[in-house]
Every structure is written in C-alpha cells, then in structure tokens.
Image (cartoon, rainbow, N blue to C red):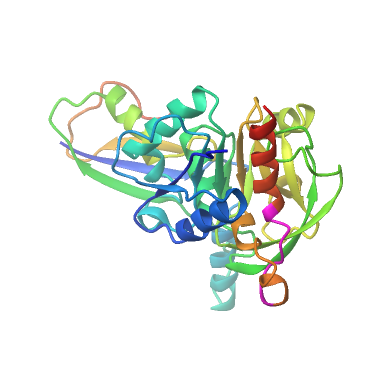
C-alpha cells in the first residue's frame, strides 16, 4: 500500500523559508499571493494492512517533529486507513 | 583525576576533534571517541559530548537521524543515571530531537548561515556547566549555524525561565531564537545544549585569530564541579 505523509509547520510557527519564497514570488511579479508555507511530502510503500497507528508512531518518532510540525496521513491507492489522518 | 569523557561522532560530525581536543586541553586526559553505530558508551563515564556538524547530512531535520541512532539510546540511558551531557550546535539539535531537552531548532530567521563570534549573556549560574560564571556575565563564543533559531511554545519558555534553565542568551540575537535563547539546561541541570561553540574558544593563541578563550570556562566549570563533587 502506498501512503503519503504531509508534514507542515504548525499554524503560528514562523516559516522564514515560506516568507523568503513569498518575497521571491512577489519579485517575479506574481500578484495576489497572500501567504506561503513550506512543508515536506514523504511517500512510502508499506505492507498492506499497516495500521494508521503504526504510521502515526513513525511520524511521532521520526518523520515529524511535533514540537513545531503537524502531519496528515493519506492512502494513495484507495486502501482506506482505519481512522482519519488528522493529528491535531 | 581520571576524567573519563566521551565524544560521539556521527557521519557528518565535523567538530568532534575540536571537542576532544578541548576536553583534553582542559582536563589533561584524552577524550574517548565513540562511533554513532555503537550501542554502548565506555563504562564509568564522567561526561558525554555531542559535537557540532551535519550529522547524516541534516537529512529530514537537523539532528533527527542522529537522535534515533543506536548510540543515542546509550546517551539517554547515561543521562538518566546523571552523567553530564553537553550538546553543541548540531549536538544541541540532537538533544532537542531526542527529547533530552525541550523545544526545537529551526532555520535561522534571516535564512542565512551565520558564522561570527557572538556575545552571550550568562543566565543560570548554578549548574555544573555554569557555576563558575557571574549572573549576567558576558562571554564571547563563536557561532556557526544555519538552524539555530530556538523555538518552544510560551508555556515551555515560561517554564525554562521560571526554573532558571536558560544557560546563555544572545546579546545580539540574529537567528530569531525566542527570548534570545542560545543554550538551555535540563531540569536537573546536567544536560546543556547550546548553539555557540565553546570548544572553539579554548586556547590563548586563538585570542587574536579566533574566538578567544571564554569557551574554556564552560569545560573548567564541569571539571571543577566533578572534582569537588
């Protein structure tokens, strides 16, 4: 089964990288960009039936730093996860 | 005194030799070197240091991979027995990633790598790392980092300050660290994480060209505290 983990900074945590990219987009002349936040995508092939609980442990222990980041877990090939993927 | 200190080397560490050299310069005893893949530290340790560098290429997040390496389990266990642990720069990042210290170190607010000598203000003066300093004393210590922007939520910051666990603050905060924090202590005061490099400010010959000798005092404090214990 294919899963995708989206890791992003928690709301309220300043994202200097996003801000710099925002400035660059402004500099290129793109108008109307109001906010840019940068995160990370991790895609994994895992054994069928891997529980959401196990995936969460992977996120909590390594893939995300929950002091500053939150994550969502998505199934990519239609196999449902046993619970919804929002962690906050 | 047979000061038994160990310096951990991860793939990508680049201040491990400086750290070992600093420990030997201050204690007169060569520091033991430990590779990240080992699962045990030398026995009867007096001190463990996690050096600066870019462990595992800073993959995922600075310090994240190292925090899950075999040797870190041994470091966490040693810390649990009260062995003093110092993490400098990447070592500080490893300490926060491993949960030995609270908070996280994010990309510098200005996005740039900062390499200069920083003026620090001493906060805590009761830990074994800081007992030889005067409150508010100023130190000059080199910094060199891209991810030194200390973040913790307000409750954690209040707790750190309330428990007198801020060891050092930047006088001129250029990386965006909350409350100017440059270094913090664990609740029992036996783990210190700091972004500035005391091991680069050790030798009198370096006064003109490098960071001076203020960093030496951090190590002298530890040695003094352990000798008098």
Residue A39: where, in percent of width, then height?
45, 51
Residue B212 within the segment the image draws in magenta:
yes
Q: Nearer the viewer, residue A53 or A30?
A: A53
Q: Can residue B196 be seen at all in this image of the molecule?
A: no
**Residue A74 position by quadrant:** top left
Q: Nearer the viewer, residue B20 or B98?
A: B20
- Give the quarter of the figure containing the N terminus of chain B: top right
What residue is at 55 percent from the left and 73 percent from the top? A24
Residue B215 within the segment the image draws in magenta:
yes
Residue B30: where, in percent of width, then height?
47, 51
| Left or right: where B193 falls relative to B29 | right
Q: How many marks?
A: 0
**Residue A54 position by quadrant:** top left
Q: Does residue B78 lie above or below A16 as drawn?
A: above
Q: Nearer the viewer, residue B29 or B210?
A: B29
| Left or right: where B222 falls relative to B16 | right
What residue is at 73 percent from the left and 62 percent from the top? B118
Residue B46: where, in percent of width, then height?
53, 34
What residue span does the magenta drawing correspond to? B209-216
Query: Magenta stretch: dominant SS?
Result: loop
- Give the quarter of the figure containing the C terminus of chain B: top right
What residue is at 31 percent from the left and 47 percent from the top? A42
């Amino acid at each position: 089964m294919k899963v995708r983990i989206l890791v992003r900074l928690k709301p309220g945590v300043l994202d200097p990288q996003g801000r710099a990219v925002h400035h660059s987009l402004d500099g290129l002349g793109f108008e109307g960009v109001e906010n840019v936040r940068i995160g990370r995508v991790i895609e994994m092939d895992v054994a069928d039936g891997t529980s959401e609980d196990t995936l969460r442990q992977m996120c909590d222990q390594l893939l995300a730093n929950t002091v500053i980041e939150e994550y969502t877990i998505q199934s990519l090939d239609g196999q449902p996860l046993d619970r919804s993927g929002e962690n906050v | 005194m047979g000061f038994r200190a160990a310096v951990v080397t991860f793939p990508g560490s680049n201040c491990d030799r400086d750290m070992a050299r600093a420990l030997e310069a201050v204690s007169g005893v060569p520091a033991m070197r430990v590779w990240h893949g080992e699962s045990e530290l030398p026995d009867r340790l007096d001190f463990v240091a996690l050096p600066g560098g870019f462990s595992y290429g800073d993959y995922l997040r600075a310090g994240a991979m190292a925090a899950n390496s075999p040797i870190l389990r041994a470091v966490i266990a040693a810390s649990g027995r009260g062995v003093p642990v110092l993490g400098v720069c990447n070592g500080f990042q490893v300490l926060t990633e491993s949960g030995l210290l609270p908070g996280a170190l994010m990309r510098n607010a200005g996005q740039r790598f900062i390499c200069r000598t920083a003026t620090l203000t001493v906060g805590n003066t009761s830990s074994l790392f800081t007992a030889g300093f005067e409150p508010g004393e100023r130190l000059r210590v080199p910094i060199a980092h891209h991810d030194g922007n200390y973040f913790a939520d307000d409750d954690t910051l209040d707790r750190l300050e309330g428990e007198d666990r801020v060891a050092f603050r930047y006088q001129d905060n250029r990386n965006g660290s909350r409350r100017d924090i440059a270094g913090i202590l664990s609740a029992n005061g036996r783990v210190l994480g700091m972004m500035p490099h005391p091991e680069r400010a050790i030798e009198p010959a370096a006064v003109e060209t490098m960071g001076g000798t203020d960093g030496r005092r951090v190590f002298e404090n530890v040695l003094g505290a352990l000798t008098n214990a």
